[in-house]
Image (cartoon, grey):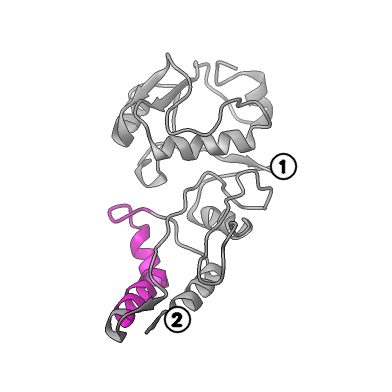
Amino acid sequence: ITAWNDPAIAAENPGVTLPELDIIPVNRSDESGTTENFTEWLAAAANGAWPHEASGDWPLSGGQSGAQTQGMIDTVSSAEGTIGYADASRAGDLGTVAVGVGDAFVPYSAEAAAAVVDASPAAEGASDKQLTIELDRATTAAGAYPVVLISYSIACSVYDNQQDADNVKGFLTYVASEAGQQRAADPTVAGSAPISGELRTAVEAAIASISAS
């Protein structure tokens, strides 16, 4: 498939007039966690069509590329027919892709990003205080968008004095709160997708368990 109006693409987009343009893939030219995240999803969800392992270095050579996120955005924006990958918070006016999940195509949204976290199992070694997730990149959960990256806040479970414990609990309580999550969702702050209410309940319980010796 080398053109946007290829019959295989048209079959997945009934009723849509597709442009007669070459597909121009754009990748990061530098080693990148975004590239590793994207290729991890490709390796898990492409049913063998992507033969490469997840890596921070793009495994193919000879295509269009850009250094760092801004270089990627600039390269994608500079021509017609391009497609690349970047943090959603940096996409700006560029279109975003609905990805195949089960029998449906799920567009990106903060809610869909939170949904894949809720639909994924706990990672090995996780507990009620260590809320680590093994992202299910090949999920078929309705409304889940599996091309995401999870960031964690890390704290001690026990502090030497009550003041330190209270300060950490206060900070993390705000971070996990609806107000804190909405603040972090601001593209000028972090551009992250807010956690779900279900996950917030588990996070708040873990925070409440922090104590002083």
**Residue at which label 1 appears:** 103
**What residue is rendered at 48% in x and 75% in y?**
206
Inter-mark Cα distance, 2 to 1: 40 Å
Label 1 environment density (alpha carbons within 10 Å; few <14, some 14–19, many ≥20): few
| In the image: residue 133, left or right of residue 192 | right
Magenta-drawn stretch contains 198:
no
The answer, for residue 196, to whether it is visible in the render is yes
Quarter of the view holding residue 75: top left
Label 2 environment density (alpha carbons within 10 Å; few <14, some 14–19, many ≥20): some
Label 2 or label 1, whichever comes before in sequence order: 1
The percent coordinates of residue 93 (x first, y second) are 37, 39
The percent coordinates of residue 191 (x first, y second) are 36, 53
| Badge 2 amino acid | Ala
| Badge 1 amino acid | Asp
**What residue is rendered at 41% in x and 21% in y?**
80
Q: Main secondary structure of the magenta part?
A: helix
- Is 41 situated above or below 176? above
Specify the quadrant that holds the N terminus.
Answer: top right
**What residue is rendered at 52% in x and 53% in y?**
113
Frontmost residue, 208 versus 183: 208
Frontmost residue, 14 versus 49: 49
- Magenta stretch bounds: 165-191
- Is 98 situated above or below 211? above
| In the image: residue 66, left or right of residue 113 | left
What SS does tag 2 mark? helix
**Residue at which label 2 appears:** 208
The percent coordinates of residue 213 (x first, y second) are 37, 84
